[in-house]
Amino acid sequence: MSDSDTVLVTDSITRLDQPQGRVIVAASHGAIYAAYLAAKAGARAVILNDASVGRDQAGISGLAYLAGFGLPAATIAHDSARIGDGADMLARGRISHVNPPARALGVAPGQSCRDAAERLRAAKPQRITVPSLDETRTLLDPGPPPVWGIDSASLLKPEDAGAIVITGSHGALLGGKPDSALKYDVRAALFSDAGIGIDQAGITRLPALAARGIAAATVSAASARIGDAKSLYRDGVISHVNTVAEAAGAKAGMATQAFVALFRGNA
């Protein structure tokens, strides 16, 4: 069996090993940025996590995006397997939503993730040109400290150390590993809670960041679009805070912009 015939399982769509022509099971949310990365990588088909669907159905918005390229895609239910954990997704995940190209291959809600992945191997590999997504990093406020909106935590840069960062990513550790919480030490960080999900996976970055002395919180996926940092900033309502953020006065129920103002005020 060639590599292209096998299913690639990964904790994040930002971490891919030889994805060209393969079916990818990625424990990332199913919003457009994750879907874009799958298409850009040359995936044959992809299964993502629906992140509780959330505001404006952002957690599954990537399915229609990929259907526009004829690329089969599906999501698993966020309460069936841990977001951020590819192995768990393959082992326990249940399909929640599918796009028309995936449906044509026999993928349907209620199937196991493993069964769906096997069915998606019948998809024909294709080469597509994927237009670049613009404004995935936005300076929301020059500060000090600066407030950056990034649609994925993978877009964090070394120079963001000390900044306040609002990321459209989910709040789950990748594969349960604490060192995956965030690449650099920022002043404060926000994520989407992705509906929290099974085993409370969607908020597991928070204690890991507290151990590093970094204030962190999650925004309710029902209040702001996952994968869209500007929506988290504009629309977001905090759902959970870690101990460092709590000690500074942050609490659940406050608006994202109030959280940001708190940490700018404490600069």
Image: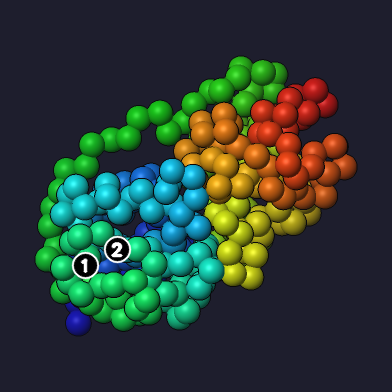
Which quadrant is the N terminus positioned in? bottom left
Residue type marked 2: Val
Give residue 185's quadrant in the image: top right
Residue 52 in the image, given as x and y percentages of width and height: 50, 58
Task: Indicate left or right for 254 with 95 as reference.
Answer: right
Residue 90 in the image, given as x and y percentages of width and height: 42, 76
Residue drawn at x 35%, y 78% as measured from the top left: 111
Task: Indicate left or right for 119 with 75 as reference.
Answer: left
Q: Secondary structure at mark 2?
A: strand
Instruction: Name the residue carrying label 1.
Output: 103
Residue 210 in the image, given as x and y percentages of width and height: 77, 51
In this rendering, the count of numbered labels is 2
Residue drawn at x 65%, y 65% as measured from the top left: 200
Q: Is residue 207 above or below residue 182?
A: below
**Do tag 2 and tag 1 residues touch (Cβ < 8 Å)?**
yes
Instruction: State the scheme by which the image is colored.
Output: rainbow
Q: Is 244 in front, or is 223? A: 223
Q: Secondary structure at mark 1?
A: helix
Residue drawn at x 47%, y 79% as measured from the top left: 92
Label 1, residues with CA under 10 Å away: few <14, some 14-19, many ≥20? some
Task: Indicate left or right for 208 with 48 as reference.
Answer: right
Residue 7 in the image, given as x and y percentages of width and height: 30, 73
Instruction: Name the residue carrying label 2.
Output: 98
Q: Is residue 161 visible?
A: no
Q: Which mark is residue 211?
A: none
Residue type marked 1: Arg
Separation of marks 2 and 1 at Cα, in angstroms: 6 Å
Label 2, residues with CA under 10 Å away: few <14, some 14-19, many ≥20? many
Residue drawn at x 47%, y 31% as measured from the top left: 137
